[in-house]
Amino acid sequence: MELFNIKFIPPLPGIYFVGGSVRDNLAGRPCKDIDIAVNGDPGLVSARIAAAANAHTPVRIGREGKSILRVVSDLYIFDVVKQNGASIEEDLAQRDFTVNAMAIEAESGRLIDPLGGHSDINSGIIRHVSKNAFKDDPIRMLRAFRIGAELGFSISKKTLEAISIHADSIYQSAGERIGEEWIRFLSIPGSFKYLVQMETCGLLDKIFPELIALKQCSQNRYHRYDVFIHSLATYRWMEKILEKETPRLFKPLSNVSQITDPVLIKHAALLHDIGKPASKQTDANGNVHFYGHEKKGAKLAEKISDRLRFSNQDKAYIDFLIANHLKPLSLFSAHCRTLLTRRISTRFFIRHEPWIPDLLAISTADMSSKGCKKKAGKYLTFIRELSRNRRDYYLPEKAKERLITGHDLISYFSLTPSPLFKKILEHVDMERLSGRIGTKDEAIREVSVFLKRRIDH
């Protein structure tokens, strides 16, 4: 228990290391967040820790009756709470999983493990503490999969059965708590296995009821699977793309390191086709179409983001990916018909910066999940080439100074600043990046043509 030989903790009776910090210590994992339960006054203990660690004054976090005192030092974050119950054993019996229901007494270093948590760590099992564990706090159901994915542990059969029974109660938890726990789950590489388990026991549908309509929603000849199976597969491929072990697959694709948010892009991958059931149409020849499903999907995703209390910035990112996930496929279709020009690809780059690497990644995951390896291979080759064009031509050209500025528009055309300025400058940028113009004189002539066209229309 070397981790807990911390000089900042007073070796007094009634002070216990608890929770995830004990679990991680026993599992041989590094831990900087140290949870402490006190059979006494948490204020006095936290103040002594702060003084010994030369840290800031303890800060109270949380609502009255369920607050903690946080001490932040250079090496650790200590969360100090009052012991919940008459004894530490009673406190542990009210926790979520056996692997989190252990304590180490600060005074003696003795392990207190009344529920067999250490054995479950050695066996690699997540097991809920009591029949009331999920009733007392439904967010624990989602946490089971997150902790399982973090540790690579199996979730016990009885725990999965209990989650199935209590899944309906997940929305007794506040939306922001669900959102926070979901984001923590998404942040774990290789979480797909646990996502499938989450779906099997019914919890995924309760968190995202919008996914239910995707099941048994058959698709057209371009897809081998129904919309739901395809969506799960897209999530799985998105994880593959993000894995560091597979640079051979994705390295040429603008660099995975350029992806803005490797966590939220997995969320968008799972939800990218949620607009399909509401958009499904069958024409006179029996062909299935999903016209506009990406826009409807973005609207549904926006509601989900609101429900989970995501920030406006995160919401905009998710909406963008879902609303535009078909755009690279449109370029591929033009390429296959030898209709893709530099102007078309340049327009795509201009309109979808700065999230082009993200868009190419989710589009690649989408195509790879349709069940046609041959077409997916051709698509990946195309995406790599498109990405190289962006890296080697578009970005260097974009970094150069503009041919004209707003001052030129005032000087040469007597225009006054207005939203029209932006349209003109973007148009000139498009012509330059497409290779049609390359000098200031050519840019001025292009503006003249642009303004004349507007007058004529």
Image (cartoon, rainbow, N blue to C red):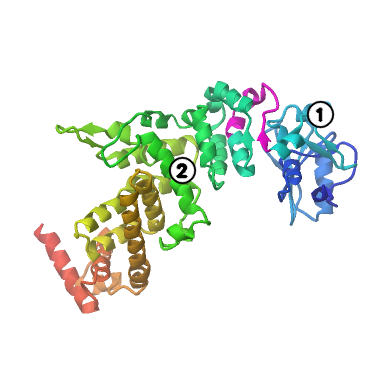
Q: Is residue 134 magenta?
A: yes
**In what quadrant of the picture does the C terminus appear?**
bottom left
Q: Amino acid at mark 2?
A: His
Residue 150 picture location, percent across and down: 62, 43
Q: Earlier in the sequence, mark 1 or mark 2?
A: 1
The crowding category of the residue bearing disc 1, from other C-alpha atoms within 10 Å (few below 14, some 14 to 19, many at least 20), is some
Within the magenta stretch, is there residue 146? no
Q: Position of 76 compared to 369: left or right? A: right
Residue hosting label 1: 89
Q: Residue at x 74, y 43 (%)?
A: 21
Q: Amino acid at mark 1?
A: Glu
Residue 226's x, y, as percent?
35, 34
Of residue 325 and residue 191, the one placed in the foreground of this image is 191
SS at mark 2 in the image: helix
Q: Can the viewer see residue 312 in this picture?
A: no
The 10 Å Cα crowd at callout 2, few under 14, some 14 to 19, many 20 or more, is: some
Q: Residue at x 66, y 25 (%)?
A: 133
Magenta residues span 124-142
Asked which quadrant contains residue 370, the reply is top left
Q: Residue at x 59, y 27 (%)?
A: 160
Q: Residue at x 38, y 42 (%)?
A: 272
In the image, residue 226 sits, relative to residue 391, either above or below, namely: above
Q: Is residue 211 left or right of residue 179?
A: left
Residues at discs 1 and 2 in contact (Cβ within 8 Å) = no
Residue 139 figure quarter: top right
Marking on residue 405: none
Does residue 263 lie above or below 432 as drawn?
A: above
Q: Which element is circle 1 on?
A: helix
Q: Which residue is mark 2?
A: 267
Answer whether residue 124 is visible to the viewer in this image. yes
From the viewer's perspective, tell me whether residue 255 is left or right of residue 442. right
Q: Position of residue 240 (x, y in %)?
A: 47, 50
